[in-house]
Amino acid sequence: MNASRIDPLRRQYELVRALFEYHLERLEPGDHRWEPAPLCWTVRRSADGRWVPDRSDTEPDPVPVPTIAWLGWHIGWWWGVTVDHLRGRPPRAREEITWPGDEEAVEWLRGLCARWSAVLDELEGADPDAEAPFPWPEGSGFTVLDTVAWVNSELMKNVAEIGQLRLLRAASGRG
């Protein structure tokens, strides 16, 4: 990808990643599955011991408040599938993306950041105007550059949600 076109998006990503790291280094294991409201989406142990996210094929009304664990799984799902698409691999199904648990979650999320940085490096020299395979419908006209910008905005939103939940739990004195 032409460096002059990716550089502003890379700098924006690094800013979001720094905010993410600020919250990641302050997360405690008890923060991940803290439920701030009666109606929450979280991750729950299945019979085989895997963490399974609450979810629905249609958006519920009212929308449940996600826990940090659910947001972590969500980041792992959309970011992992985006990386799969951009690397030309078959995207994993939602059910294949599993949250690793309270103790491993922070390192797992840092690993996602490292993989994305590697993808950005791989995109150097690529055509920024090539049609993007994800998250857009085929023939939408959205490009790889649009996908990089989308990752930045989606990550920024999720990082802000994680930060807000972390701050609310700390301020509430509950845990």
Image: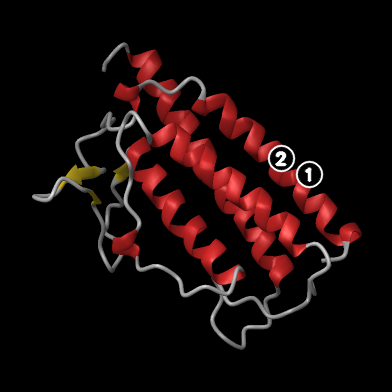
Location of residue 22 with respect to 11 vertically, above or below = above
Residue 1: x %, y % from top left: 82, 66
Q: Residue furthest left?
A: 47
Residue 3: x %, y % from top left: 88, 58
Residue 140: x %, y % from top left: 62, 83
Residue 157: x %, y % from top left: 54, 45
Label 1, secondary structure: give it. Answer: helix
Residue identified by numbered label 2: 14
- At label 1, the amino acid type is Arg
Question: What residue appears at the point 37 percent right and 36 percent down from the top-left corner?
Answer: 68
Label at residue 11: 1
Front position in the image: 40 or 44: 44
Q: Does 111 sit left or right of 37 as displayed?
A: right
Q: Are marks 1 and 2 in contact (CB under 8 Å)?
A: yes
Q: Is residue 39 visible?
A: yes
Location of residue 82 with respect to 32 vertically, above or below = below
Label 2, secondary structure: give it. Answer: helix
Location of residue 107 with respect to 63 vertically, above or below = above
Question: What residue appears at the point 19 percent right and 36 percent down from the top-left corner?
Answer: 38
Q: Does 23 sit left or right of 34 as displayed?
A: right
- For marks 1 and 2, give the CA distance: 5 Å
